């Protein structure tokens, strides 16, 4: 599904010609002299423009564009700048890709054996039956699930659970709209708290030099306060805009039985998460730990072998393409050229970060947040006056928290498809939630991250 409705009216052959031109013209060096580009920078600019056109128009699947970046980098850019061709292929098998693969398999294990739904029901049973508490419970549960699995899977699970809750809420009561929107908000916001929560996080983590890359636990320490504030404000906003007339929402109880495979899945999930959280205390990388659910999940028969085919391999290729694009920009020196065009000398650090966040939001509104992170993070990391870790995380957070349009993210599209809310209301609320999320990152995140840096030396 394209992110720009008007694009669907453009003939694919015309988009193909445009894509070819934005690659060929810079690659031939026709713009090098007017723009002050080196040979390698011209080719890299062509690759970036090609990726931008294809990602926005989606005339071909996103993963095809990502693989094409690797092919163009290996065949066109590598010989021009004198590096090995596999420089632009290695990102597709990086540690971050293995980390995400493990996250996908673990998500499938937890979903198959009902652990995610058990968690959701347990949380909702604890929060009580008053509408504000139920709304908070739905939002917190969705965010908690989104931290450890794809926000699409988390949304699917919570919408299924809402199928149990909504029938006990009278038709016409605003609580129905608030509950559905809380799922979108929780899914989009929750992913920022862990490196595996959303693809932009993985791109940020892999783009950082080893000495600046946060551990799994330190990422959570940085992300959880921002998430907590954003969720709290979003909850208050939904309560104010959609006040309920219902006194209590009683969730039907279902018997819970623990089978042997369900216990094994819980142990596997706990062990994997524990190893991720304690990275640095053992010699295993995050990606290596990610192989544990793959080996145990399939080897221990917690998942059937055919489930491997159902994993979102396209997402892994898209993330790999983003990492490859970062290599294209940095290896060619294109990042330095782009930075020379920006008026950064006259801007302070906070204003520069706000500008980068705004750029990330604008791109993520009309294209996938993964593609937006692929484009913005490599450029942002080339700004020498900004701390690399803070900059990469800020851009990743802004990409992940964009929820302006019903098609901006998969959770938005899934929630909008329930026909519970109209488009103008969704856009109005989505703009507010996006502003809340990015504002929390700037107002809460920056001081908190600065304090952490001071405490840790």
Image (cartoon, rainbow, N blue to C red):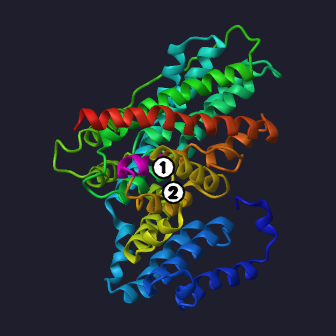
Q: Is residue 111 visible?
A: no
Q: Quadrant of residue 153?
A: top right
User: x and y percent of residue 231 in the render?
Assistant: 55, 28
Q: Which residue is mark 2?
A: 373
Q: Secondary structure at mark 1?
A: helix
Q: Which residue is mark 1?
A: 396
| CB contact under 8 Å: marks 2 and 1 | yes
Mark 2 is surrounded, within 10 Å at the Cα level, by few (under 14), some (14 to 19) or many (20 or more) other residues, namely: many
Query: Of residues 275 and 366, which is closer to you in this image?
Result: 366
Residue 412: in magenta span: no
Q: Looking at the image, which residue is at 33% across and 64% down? A: 94
User: x and y percent of residue 16 in the render?
Assistant: 68, 81
Dominant SS type (magenta): helix
Where does the magenta region start and end?
A: 386-396
Q: Residue furthest front?
A: 346
Looking at the image, tell me whether mark 2 or mark 1 is earlier in sequence order. Answer: 2
Residue 221 is marked as: none
Residue 261 lies left or right of residue 351; in this view the side is: left
Q: Looking at the image, which residue is at 64% across and 53% down? A: 362
Q: Looking at the image, which residue is at 40% across and 77% down? A: 332
Residue 159 lies left or right of residue 311; in this view the side is: right
Q: CA distance from mark 2 to mark 1?
A: 6 Å
Mark 1 is surrounded, within 10 Å at the Cα level, by few (under 14), some (14 to 19) or many (20 or more) other residues, namely: many
Query: Of residues 345 and 281, which is closer to you in this image?
Result: 345
Q: Which quadrant holds the C terminus?
A: top left
Q: Residue furthest top?
A: 247
Q: Measured along the vertical axis of the image, is residue 28 above or below residue 304?
A: below
């Amino acid at each position: 599904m394209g992110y720009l409705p008007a694009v669907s009216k453009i003939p694919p052959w015309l988009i193909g010609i445009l894509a070819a031109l934005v690659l060929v013209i810079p690659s031939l060096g026709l713009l090098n002299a007017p723009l002050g580009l080196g040979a390698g920078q011209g080719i890299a600019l062509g690759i970036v423009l090609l990726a931008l056109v294809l990602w926005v128009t989606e005339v071909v699947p996103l993963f095809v564009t990502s693989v094409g970046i690797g092919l163009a980098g290996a065949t066109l850019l590598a010989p021009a700048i004198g590096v090995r061709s596999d420089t632009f292929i290695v990102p597709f098998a990086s540690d971050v890709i293995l980390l995400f693969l493990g996250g996908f398999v673990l998500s499938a294990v937890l979903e198959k054996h009902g652990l995610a739904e058990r968690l959701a029901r347990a949380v909702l049973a604890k929060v009580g039956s008053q509408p504000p508490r139920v709304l908070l419970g739905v939002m917190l549960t969705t965010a908690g699930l989104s931290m450890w699995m794809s926000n699409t899977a988390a949304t699917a699970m919570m919408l299924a659970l809402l199928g149990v809750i909504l029938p006990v809420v009278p038709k016409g009561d605003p609580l129905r709209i608030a509950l559905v929107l809380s799922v979108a908000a929780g899914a989009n916001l929750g992913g920022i708290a862990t490196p595996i929560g959303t693809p932009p996080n993985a791109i940020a983590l892999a783009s950082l030099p080893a000495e600046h890359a946060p551990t799994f636990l330190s990422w959570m320490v940085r992300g959880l306060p921002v998430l907590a504030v954003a969720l709290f404000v979003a909850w208050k906003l939904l309560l104010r805009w959609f006040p309920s007339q219902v006194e209590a929402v009683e969730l039907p109880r279902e018997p819970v039985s623990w089978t042997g495979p369900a216990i094994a899945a819980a142990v596997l999930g706990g062990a994997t998460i524990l190893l991720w959280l304690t990275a640095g205390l053992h010699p295993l990388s995050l990606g290596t730990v990610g192989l544990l659910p793959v080996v145990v999940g399939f080897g221990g028969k917690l998942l059937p072998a055919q489930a491997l085919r159902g994993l979102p391999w396209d997402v892994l290729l898209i993330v790999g393409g983003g990492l490859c694009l970062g290599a294209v920009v940095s290896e060619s020196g294109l990042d330095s050229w782009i930075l020379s065009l920006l008026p950064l000398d006259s801007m302070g650090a906070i204003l520069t970060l706000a500008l980068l966040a705004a750029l990330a939001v604008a791109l993520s509104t009309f294209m996938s947040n993964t593609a937006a992170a692929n484009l913005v993070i490599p450029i942002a990391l080339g700004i020498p006056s900004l701390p690399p870790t803070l900059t990469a995380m800020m851009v990743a957070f802004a990409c992940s928290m964009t929820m302006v349009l019903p098609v901006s993210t998969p959770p938005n599209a899934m929630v909008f498809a329930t026909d519970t809310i109209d488009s103008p209301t969704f856009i109005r609320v989505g703009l507010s939630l996006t502003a809340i999320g990015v504002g929390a990152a700037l107002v809460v995140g920056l001081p908190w991250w600065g304090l952490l840096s001071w405490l840790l030396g």
